[in-house]
Image: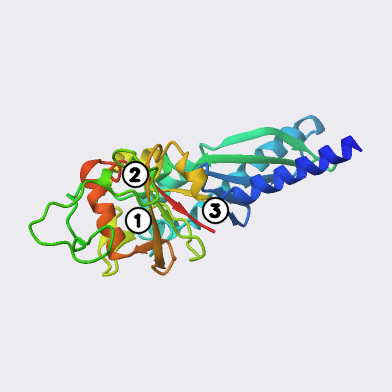
Amino acid sequence: MKRILFTILMIGVFAFCMNAQVVQQIAGGNVDWNTQVIRATGIGAPNPNLPLTAQRAGALRAAKINAARNLLEIVKGINLTSETTVENAMLVNDVIVTRVEGVVRNFNIVGEPRYMSTGDVEITVEMPLTGDLLNTVLPEQFGGAAPTAATPAVCPVCGRPWPAGMPYPSGGTMQTGAASGAGVFTGLIVDAKGLGLRPAMAPKILDENGNEIYGSRYVSREWAVKIGMVGYEKDVNRARTNDRVTNNPLIVRATKVDGPNQADLVVSAMDASRIQAAAANMNFLDKCKVMFIVD
């Protein structure tokens, strides 16, 4: 009985962990947006024309080739922005094609190869979503622009226009979603639960007029390549403890998603002002200390 109960408990824990992951399933593998890792499976069959002693090694080579092919197809299907995919970027630039193919070939094999009774070999491979891949697909002219006050300042409490000439409250005075009594904000969490947001490598946050509050115009390209522009989570409380935004993130609620790929978020004028005011005190937006909460 104890063994049965333990098994049920472990199944429940496993199911909970799987449900908590932001995983995008794509034919041949998946993209784990929590850990920012792309995974694919490759299967290779033995060549009957080779000596028996060489067939297993040949099957393993074939599995690696198949895995690299599947990994490349997964990468192509990833949303780069809310308007384009990685494949779209590759279609207009042969240099990107060559570089992406080179990055994909540097995959890591996860665990041990699985040898089937038929002689086939199956392997699982993975590669980071950040680093070399992002460095390849992000434009060279990326970020670095000085933030502008795209959204008229509004009162962080009542939402009315902020009086002209009156100093705006510092980020530390606005405690929306943050721990009370804390100082300046250390990051940004945008709750998009129920809006159908789709992950992307370079998403944006817009105000109600379509002005960019956060995105490729302003972030540091170095930080975007290093950790990705946005982290994704399914739970606000887990996101608050994430090293990316901890220990006192500003939390706002998105009003809708935007763009053909449904990857950008729109926030209210009040929250746009809160984000801009908080970022004026700390450079957390420049360092990509931003997380989106998805379904």
Locate residue 222, reporting x and y percent.
30, 39
Mark with earlier residue (2, 3)? 3
Looking at the image, which is closer to me, 31 or 147?
Answer: 147
Q: Given the image, on which type of amino acid does mark 1 rest?
A: Asn
Residue sitting at 53 percent across and 50 percent down? 235
The residue identified by callout 2 is 288
Q: Identify the secondary structure beneath mark 2.
A: loop
Disc 1 target residue: 93
Q: Is residue 257 left or right of residue 193?
A: left
Which quadrant of the view contains residue 227?
Answer: top left
10 Å crowding of disc 1: few (<14), some (14-19), many (20+)? few
Q: Is residue 287 left or right of residue 44?
A: left
Q: CA distance from mark 3 to mark 1?
A: 18 Å
Residue 42 visible in this rendered orientation of the protein: yes
Depth check: 239 or 111 in front?
239
Q: Residue at x 10, y 55 (%)?
A: 166
Horizontal side of residue 58 vs 72, given as left or right: right
| First in residue order: circle 1 vs circle 2 | 1
The residue labelled by disc 3 is: 74
Location of residue 155 in the rendering, given as x and y in whole percent from the top left corner: 23, 60
Q: Give the amino acid at mark 2.
A: Cys
Residue 196 x %, y %: 50, 65
Give the answer, above or below, for where 206 lies relative to 13: below
Residue for point 71% across, 43% down: 13
